[in-house]
Amino acid sequence: MLMGMCALFCYTSCQSKKEEKEEKTTFLVTSPLKKDTLITKEYVSQIHAISHIEIRALEKGYLQKIFVDEGQSVRKGQLMFQIMPTMYQAELQKAQAEASFANIEYQNTQKLAQSNIVAPNELAMAKAKLNKAKAEVTLAQVHLGFTQIKAPFDGIMDHFQVRLGSLVDEGDLLTTLSDNSQMWVYFNVPEAEYLDYKTSLKTENQTKVKLMMANQQVFEFPGKVETIEADFNNETGNIAFRATFPNPKGLLRHGETGNILMEVPMKNALLVPQKATFEVLDKKYVYVVDKDNVLRSREISVAAELPHIFVVQKGLAPDDKILLEGLRLVRENEKIHTKFVAPAKVMSELELYAE
C-alpha cells in the first residue's frame, strides 16, 4: 500500500510538472491588422510673423524723440519716432510764402487780362507759376510729415538700431515691427509625400496641422495649410508648404522654430503591436511562426509609429503569424506551442488612436 501511494504521488507530481511545462511553452501569436489609418508626420519648421517689416528713416536729421520702447505693442498710426523738423518747417514756410506771392501775381494778371491789357498767354503763365508754387507747398508738407514716423499696422516693436540724439540719414534702419496676430509657419515636404498629400486631399480637415513648439508642447490653436510654393528645390527634392496659425495670446514670435505635425491618411496599412518587435543593431525584427510552429526572425521596415503600434512598410504579409509575447523566452528556429489571438482583439486592448 505504501509503495502504491508513493507511485501515485510520483505520477501526480510528474503530471503536474508536465502540465506546467506545457503551460509555460504556450505562446500567444497574432497576425498584422490591415486597416485604413492616419499617421502623424513631423516636419522641421520656421515661424514668421504675418507681417514683419523694417522701419527706416525717410528724412535726414537728428532723432529728437522716441515715443515707444523695445518690445512694446503699438497701434496703427501711433507715433514712434520724431526726427528734428526745424529745417523742414522752414522749407514749408518758404514754399507757402512763394505760393502766396504767386497767387497775388496771378490775381493781378487775371484783372489785367480781363481788361485786355495783357495777352492770354501771360495769364496762363501766371496760372502755371501758381500751380508750381502750390505743388512745392505740398512737397514741403510731405517732407515735414516724414519727420514723424508712425506705425503702419498694429504690432510689436523690436530692438532699436538707433538712440535718442543719433544723426540718421535717409534710409537708415531704426527698428523692425512684427504683426503677430497670425503666424506663417514654413516647412519642407519631400516630393513623394507631397504627391500623397495632393492625391489624398478630399476634405478641408486634411489641411489642418498642429505645431509642436521648442519646449515639446503642442500649440493650443491648430493651423491650416493654405499655400504650397510653385517649384521644388532641385538640390533637396523638397517643396515648401506654408501653414497659418492664429496667435490670439501672442505666444508665438517671429523667428521661432518648431515642428509641424501633419496627419496623413494611409490606405490598407499593416499594423503590428510594438511589443511584438525587437531590435538588433537599430533594425527592427519580429518572430514569424511558420506552418510547423517554428520561429523565424524577420526584419521589418516601419513606415510610421503610433501609440503602442508600428505601421509596417515591408517585411510582413497580412496572413503571417507573429509572436505576440515572450520574445525573450524563445530563440531562433525553436518550435513552440501557440495560441492564436485575433488581430482586432489584440488592437482593441491597446491604446489605438487610428481611424
Image (cartoon, rainbow, N blue to C red):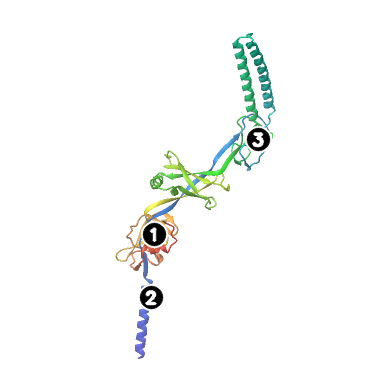
Residue 37: name its quadrant. bottom left
Frontmost of labels 3 and 1 is 3
Q: Disc number at residue 20?
A: 2
Q: Residues within 10 Å of mark 1 (few under 14, many from 20)?
A: many
Provide residue 250's location: percent of width, then percent of height.
Answer: 58, 47
Work out whether mark 1 precedes mark 2 in sequence or the reverse, and give the earlier one.
2
What distance separates the C-alpha of mark 1 from that of mark 2?
A: 29 Å
Residue at screen point 66% across, 14% down:
108
Q: Are marks 1 and 2 in contact (CB under 8 Å)?
A: no
Q: Quadrant of the N terminus?
A: bottom left
Provide residue 140's location: percent of width, then percent of height.
Answer: 64, 25
Residue at screen point 66% across, 16% down:
107
For this rendering, which residue is in front, 325 or 340? 340
In this rendering, the answer to whether 338 lies above or below 93 is below
Q: Disc number at residue 81?
A: 3
Q: Residues within 10 Å of mark 2 (few under 14, many from 20)?
A: few
- Determine which residue is flagged by label 1: 272
